[in-house]
Image: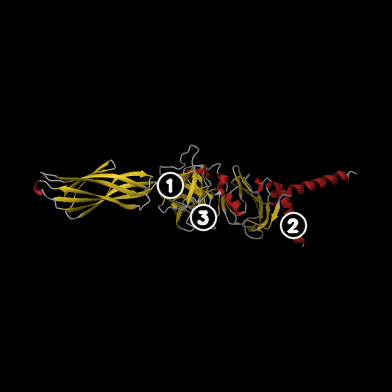
Amino acid sequence: MPNKIVTIQLQSVEYGGDNLGDDIAIDLNIGGVNATIRDQIKHGATRTFNRPLSRFQNTNNTVRIAVSATVTEEDIVYNDIGSGSGNLTVDLNGAANQPIGSVKVNVPGSGGDKGDTGVFTLNFTAKLEEVYRFVPDVSRGWMRARIEATATNESLPYTVAVSYTKTERGREYFTILEGAHRGKGASVSLNTNGTSRFLTADPRSTGVRLRFTKSTGALELIGTALRYQTITDPRNPIPNGEWDIEIPDYPHALGASYEDRAQRAKTWFRLGHSGDRYLHTGRVSAGCVTVSEVQRWDELYARIIGARKGDAVSVGVLEVR
Amino acid sequence: MRRAPAVLLAAVAILCGCAGLHHIQERSSHGSLRVGAPIPSFAAVTETGQHFHSRDSWTNLTIYSVGQAHPDFSLDVAEDVSSLAVRKMGARIVRTRDGVVANLFGMKVAKEEPFEYDTTMVVICDTNCLVLRIWRSAGVEDLDELLKQLEVSRESSVSK
């Protein structure tokens, strides 16, 4: 079953038939939503609008929407007015941008234009967006899910976006859209009261930028006054430059000894997209950037867990100097 | 006749000592550790803010004890060392429960709540940070006996 946000757009208006003038007003009713467009359209031309008219969420395979239109060529004395109606059909399993039909409106002339008929063709498109849901903040930031292809259980970090697919036999099925398991189909059981485990409100924000100065061990969250003391192994230092900070990959059991002071101590953020350098908390570093202020780790975690760089993999960038 | 109880006591003491250590397994390697090789490189900061590096040479032995009952990372030197034998040797003790060290030493998290490793480890390094001995299932309470073994083996290697 699809679950999409549908945006109906007036894509374009073709002005054919006879020339009635170019001051055009279009009054539309799209599935009960009214909209008016006023613009100059030259006779014989096709004017592109791509104007969103209505937006709604739907879970059916196809949606039929009734549309009615009144087109007026506005004159000082006599307006030329015509109406038309039709149905638009949206295929929710179809393309993200799809034509969904046209409505033809014949506008008979009046006054000096009497006997002429302008023909306006209104072309509509639909834009489809996935309905995202988000991993909730459970079990210290990790929700267990079954990866369908391998029938294995994996942990997904708080804030990761998923695309809902279906609910069947007490389980919600979805595709993971971000992080280490992106692209995989997975499922979780519903809550005991039959409701979804997922968040519907987007907890994510724009990417963060951190700066790590090796000589002082200071880690700064750029744009804020937040600064943390860290340790790193000077015999195995992280090279200078910019490192993507990844969405957490899995709960690191090695952080468990700090959970009495930092609830999110098992959440480590990999630096770069390969290797085993991480941003994490603790008192020992073997080449990672280790936040030694353990009791402040949850504060830093809260600032970066929902941040997104925009590549579906990273929360932001660490600048090392 | 008076010697008999003393001999008996000595035998019991030896047996108890052996019984106390029988669970300890000496290893030639464990995780990233290898006897004769440098200890894995890591930096740490103690709970008092003191900086430590595993590869910084020191004037005497460094003893690592890793287990869930220890502090995050502590470094005991001279009079801070509780073990008399260790103090006599002039060694220092690192006690840690940190997961990075545990991982380098080949330990695994057996249980997360309550937090527990699959074993405890004692590792001794010389002044150049080379690993001298690795003991699995050993703790600070075993140090006096383990150091005796170390002394004996050193003496025997010298006498050879």
Disc 1 is placed on an element classified as: strand
Q: Which residue is mark 1?
A: A164
Residue flagged by tag 3: what amino acid is it?
Answer: Arg
Tags 2 and 1 both on a single chain: no
Q: Of label 3 and label 1, which has the lower sequence position?
A: 1
Residue for badge 2? B153
Tell me the number on the disc at residue A277: 3
Separation (CA) of disc 3 from disc 1: 33 Å
Instruction: Name the chain under label 2.
Output: B
Q: Amino acid at mark 1?
A: Tyr
Is the residue marked by circle 2 packed among few (<14), some (14-19), or many (20+) residues within 10 Å? Answer: few
Query: Which residue occupies the extreme top position in the image?
Result: A193
Residue A160 pos. (x, y %):
45, 48
Q: Nearer the viewer, residue A41 or A78?
A: A78
Q: Furthest residue to the left?
A: A112
Quadrant location, the N terminus of chain B: top right
Q: Nearer the viewer, residue A302 or B75?
A: A302
Q: Position of residue A306 (x, y in %)?
A: 44, 46
Whether residue A211 is visible here, answered yes or no, is yes
Mark 2 residue element:
helix
Tag nearer the camera, 2 or 1: 1
**Chain that bears disc 3:** A
Near-viewer residue (A103 or B127): A103
Helix, strand or loop at disc 3? loop
Estimate the spatial distance between the alpha carbons at disc 2 and disc 1, rounded to whole Å. Answer: 66 Å
Question: Looking at the figure, which quarter contains the C terminus of chain B?
Answer: bottom right
Marks 2 and 3, Cα distance to the nearest angstrom? 40 Å
Labels 2 and 3 share a subunit: no
Give me the chain letter of mark 1: A
Q: Is residue A321 above or below residue A196?
A: below
- For the question of whether residue A21 can be seen, the reply is no
